[in-house]
Image (spheres, helix red, strand yellow):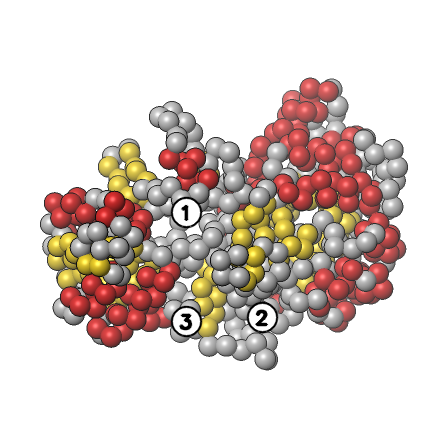
Amino acid sequence: MVTEAAGPDISARLGTLTLSAPTLMGSGCYGSGEEYAPFIDLAQLGGVVLKSVTRWPRLGNDAPRLVPVAGGLLNAIGLQNPGIDAYLANDVAKFADRPCAVIGSVAGFSVDDYADVTERLAARDEIDAIELNISCPNVGHEGETFACDPALAERATRAARAVTGKTLIVKLSPNVTDIASIARVVEDAGADALAVINTVRGMSIDVERVRPRLGNASGGLSGPAIRPIAVLAVWEVARAVRIPIVGQGGIETARDALEFILAGASAISIGTGNFTDPRAPLQVADGLRAYLARRGIARLADIVGAANPGFLGAR
Amino acid sequence: MVVTPSGERVATALGIYEAASERVSLMIVVVGPRTRELASLEPGDRLVLFGPLGNGFDLPALGGDVALVAGGVGLASLLLPAQRLLADGARVHLYYGARTAAALVDAELFASLGARVSLSTDDGTRGHRGYVSELLARDGAGHDGIAACGPSPMLRAVGDVARTLGVRAQLSLEETFACGVGACWGCVVPLARESAQAPAFPLPAPGEAREFVHARICREGPVFWSDELRW
């Protein structure tokens, strides 16, 4: 537990899960955590959101899968993963002695997929919580349909809620007309928290070869380019729901993280920011403590939504 | 991987060119803003550098008579292997191609170490006029193994020549990298399922079954046997 001598309390609560720091590592950007273990002390992280797993193994999209663009990164990985059977058999046991929270990520193409994979993954002691990835933009339209259609978002959330009592985070897509209305439906369906946002759909074209640069043609844009989009999404969602929000989209520094927190996020997630500097999560946590100390604030939770007059959540 | 001070959103993958005691050197060709920024650094400037990452050439598997094939800045990955191979008593023949004579650097360094050196340029300003793979096809029959680094079209051509010569080749690949540590699965290449380097992966769903898996260039590679690539 954080003592007075250790400085301000930056812990965060998502449902029944308490994070020692509000810094999650974004799904798909951090593998299973072990990839970064040589470069960073995982005990300093709030938690790792694992790469999404699906019912069946997936080869993923053809290369190229990455295109750096101004202020960000376009990706179209396509949910490459070994499938839930092999994942449970080979991978999950490795998370047993993780020094930070381990959040499993579930992707699917049907309501049954979400229920089945969530039930089997959440049943494992090594998994502290589940994030429902209903917003992958890179698997045709089947994956993101769930986050873009209120009825499907509700059904996927209910199906996952019915099979686990662990904290259930639902990851929303920015590629919708009104993210707040989707957030409300997902809250009503039983989600404990919302991850806001997944990547913004985008494309880059090679004008010499006269074709899209990504093997999948379109992709998801991440990085600082999408930060203002994400901050606004958090702002709007925070005025629509009472459950905690995990803010994400281009966070690289404590000041970036604070924008999300003041808009209404209880925790934040760093994805692409790890690629420019694997120490970013530690610098964000240190910077949050310094900000609170400078202002004489004891707990990070006290400033969640402080800039947002319509903030509905509890502090 | 190196991150420039202005912090572009992807790190740049660079091989260590030379290493001696506490000093390492990187070879950079200025092609865009990131490499321009690297080239303009002054002594005392700081870089975020992390590694070493991935595998390297399997030098013992190359045998006692080795062809090193470099395209342009691909030379950067071949100096340390050349030094090690020569120290271990191997014969080394460097086939080195670039666009133009001015872009051929340090050929003399390799020669001074004891390597035989053959050069090519696209414009014929030095050495063979044409591709370095053509030099390899002409003179490379006697080698036990080939190790190559350069742009992808060159590496594909080296793989084709190697098959014709009946000599196995190790190719050091490059892609756009994001994490560099195997976490993001962004830098993949199709690899034969039976390759020892193939990531453990069950057969995909019905309808998606193909004869390859996607291996990460940063993690399982960057060096792969050319006859196991399915690109």
| Residue bearing mark 1 | B13
Residue receiving disc 2: A57
Residue at disc 3, secondary structure: loop
Looking at the picture, tell me which residue is in the foreground, A16 or B35.
Answer: B35
Residue B78: percent from left, percent from top:
26, 51
Callout 1: SS: loop
- Choose top left, top right, bottom left or bottom right for residue A144: bottom right
Q: Position of residue B50 (x, y in %)?
A: 42, 41
Q: Please name the amino acid that badge 3 sits on.
A: Arg
Q: Distance between the residues labelled 1 and 3?
A: 23 Å
Q: For the N terminus of chain B, which image quadrant? A: top left
Query: Viewed as shown, does residue A254 lie left or right of B26?
Result: right
Q: Residues within 10 Å of mark 3 (few under 14, many from 20)?
A: some
Along the line of sight, the residue nearer the viewer: A96 or B176: B176
Badge 2 element: loop
Going 54% across and 43% down the picture, which residue do you hit?
B9
Q: What amino acid is labelled 1 in the image?
A: Ala
Residue A65 image position (x, y, % from top left)? 53, 59
Q: Mark 3 points at which residue?
A: B230
